[in-house]
Image (tube, rainbow, N blue to C red):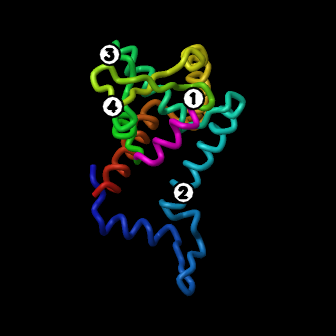
Amino acid sequence: MKVPFKLLIKAVTQTGLRYAGGINMNREKEIGYILHRAAMSAKCHFTNKLSKFDITPGQLAVLKEIYYYQINNNELGLSPACIAARLEFDRPTMTGILERMEAQGWAERVLNPQDKRSCLIRVTKKATDKLKELEDIATENSFRILKGFTEEEVVNFKNYLLRVTENCKE
């Protein structure tokens, strides 16, 4: 159900947003600020939990993308450009992430057997051996984030966040 714009404006004004000289005096009621704080809190906790493995949330996302692609498609790996596209990362960011992952032993480059001019990225044995433990940390983090929510609230929350993401693409 879409909320009519007039009702949204009425709800925002009723929350008590007040501006003085262009400075928001009640920022904790702004949706952007709330989304930012929630995302930062969740990421900070997750980053701290992953730090004992010397891996970041972004690197874990890349590792999982490559690993499950290899398993599900019986393939050697993925190209850096393909990984970037699948995760919606820009190429320079992906290059940095992959370089760090290689240096830390999470991933390795191999020649693409179909195109000798390019390489594929695949996960290492270290990554395969640690993936279950890393996924358990990710699951714990999700449970922590959603603590106190009913199943219906979780479904609705995810749908709302997906809708926000789509709205921001417009």
Query: Which mark is in front, 3 or 2?
Result: 3
| One can see residue 111 in this view | yes
Identify the residue under disc 4: 117
Tell me what residue is drawn at x 31 percent, y 54 percent. 169
Q: Is residue 148 visible?
A: no
Real-space Cα separation, disc 2 to disc 4, in angstroms: 46 Å
Local secondary structure at mark 4 = strand
Residue 96, image x and y in percent? Answer: 52, 43
Disc 1: CA contacts within 10 A as few (<14), some (14-19) or many (>=20): some
Q: Which mark is residue 138?
A: 1
Q: Is residue 162 above or below residue 15?
A: above
Magenta stretch encompasses residue 11: no
Q: Position of residue 87 (x, y in %)?
A: 39, 38
Quote the CA–CA distance across marks 3 and 2.
39 Å
What residue lies at 54% left-to-right and 35% top-to-bottom?
Answer: 59
Q: Sequence-wise, which precedes: disc 1 or disc 4? A: 4
Q: Quadrant of residue 102?
A: top right
Circles 3 and 2, Cβ within 8 Å, touching? The answer is no
Residue 67, horizontal then vertical, whole percent = 45, 21
Tag 1: amino acid: Ala
Which three-letter amino acid code belongs to the residue tagged 4? Arg
Residue under pointer 2: 34
Q: Are marks 4 and 3 in contact (CB under 8 Å)?
A: no
